[in-house]
Image (cartoon, grey):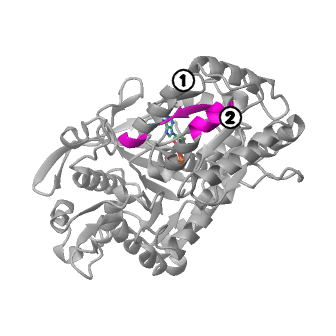
Amino acid sequence: MNILMVSAEMAPFAKVGGLADVAAALSRALAARGHDVRVVLPLYGNLDRESENIRPLKKLPPLALRVGQMVHDVRFHVRGSTSSAVKIYLVECPSLFEKHGIYTYGDGTGFEDSLSRSSLHAQAALLLPRLLDWPVDVVHAHDASSVPAVLYRQNWYAGRRIPGPAGTLLTIHNLAHQETHPINAVDTLGLSRSLASYPGLLEFHGQINLLKAGILGADLVNTVSPNYALETTRNQVFGCGLQEILLSRGDDYSGILNGGDYETWDPTRDRDLSASYGPDRLAGKAKCRTALLEELEISPESGKPVCGFVGRLVGQKGVDILLPIMSRLAQDGFAFAILGTGEPRLEKAMREVAIQQPDRIAFVDNFDESLAHRIYAGSDLFLMPSQFEPCGLSQMYALRYGTPPVVRWTGGLADTVTDAKPDLADGTGFIFTESRPESLLAALRRAEIMFADADRWLQLQAAAMAQDFCWGRAAESYERLYETAVSRQS
Ligand code: ADP
């Protein structure tokens, strides 16, 4: 099949969170299964063209594309070698994409022209099949920011101006990010105003809501774990107000568990680590632990665990229930290696906790891919106390690195981690259910006891490292969705 991916992120060069990892790894897995996969992203202002091997696609002419009242100059670029299995196209548009960042400025404030950016990105992506004379079977849009691709496919390109059937699939990586705007913003999208007033596709509670329109407009919709698909249709809180809209799609809405990108995340050949290791040779992990403690200048009490956290410092990730128990655990000998950026209030609170016990708690408020690898490897436990978690990739990496995750029983965390019991040989991590500090604390106390039992801990690490959430299985499930999406257009 010919698959056109429209995504704002792709690892490793344009990454905010899990979407980037998925866009890269799913595309690779599909290409390995014989599909022609082409990904289109904006050419962000902070991308270094030379080191990223980004160059103009000379055979395509410069274009002028209209967004609202403005006309923008656009050029296509490509990234990587021509022989790459997955082709990556980048849309250069200095007037919209010159800013550094994908969704927000450095201080976390969202871009005021996000809708214009999404519109131009989608228009350029949908033009590519015609410009390249490449019939497209499926347009696969990711998250709210790519929904305009679905809407334009359905409206502007309802006739046959896109070569190929161009069925549409929308994958929701996080239902909390919906892209809502005032009604008159429909003019920026260049779509009929009737879509923005009830019962139009875009209208939702007196605003336009891109995600809602995408859910109703795409041939098929999926999210990134079976459990999150259930939660979002059963519960208004998880559904973030869109529960009924999702339910209205019936079987056209499903959950496919993400895979782990084990090419990038493999402790047996991870160049960011000071020592490599695998399930049958764990000595390297002990070296990584020592190196991490030296790098971050922290030390746990002998026999107590090092707890790692790598993630966005936002309410979703459960940082609010972690903060109140850190000082107490640090006093009891635990050490913490925390890497993350996010909400200023949580960054500030984390900084304050770390300052009080600098020899036990290290907080790095940065985005640092390399340090992330060292934290997954050098920690004894990995913390993911999320309020909700569409899939979560970090726990999959932690498992592969022999670092049992401590997770709340929600979304994809419940699909990927099983609870370790002291007297049974099974289990891969520690699960708690209530989104309260005391529940997280109780899980950590259980982990502390098991950590003190070296044999049982080795058994747990072996079970964790044996988990295999491979992308091949997920790619097969996506193939089935693509086939259905194509049949809807044929
Ligand atoms: P989400 O997509 O909700 O952010 P996931 O667990 O699906 O959560 O994916 C998060 C990805 O982003 C992981 O690869 C994680 O290692 C990475 N990540 C998050 N914050 C940072 C950071 N500050 N530095 C490096 N990597 C980070």
* Image vertical order of residue 481 relative to residue 380, above or below: below
- Say which of marks 1 and 2 sits in front: 1
Residue 93 covered by magenta stretch: no
Residue at image location 48% in from the left, 53% down from the top = 316
The disc label shown at residue 266, or none:
2
Could you tell me if residue 115 is visible in this image?
A: yes
Query: In which image quadrant can residue 204 be found?
Result: bottom left
Q: Position of residue 100 (x, y in %)?
A: 29, 34
Whether the residue under disc 2 has CB within 8 Å of ligand 1: no
Residue at image location 81% in from the left, 29% down from the top = 282
Q: Which residues are magenta?
A: 326-346
* Image vertical order of residue 129 relative to residue 367, above or below: below
Residue nearer the viewer, 143 or 435: 435
Secondary structure category for the residue under label 1 = loop
Q: Which residue is tagged 1? A: 358
* Image vertical order of residue 244 relative to residue 11, above or below: below
Report whether 405 appears left or right of 205: right
Report whether 292 appears left or right of 388: right
Number of labels in the image equals 2
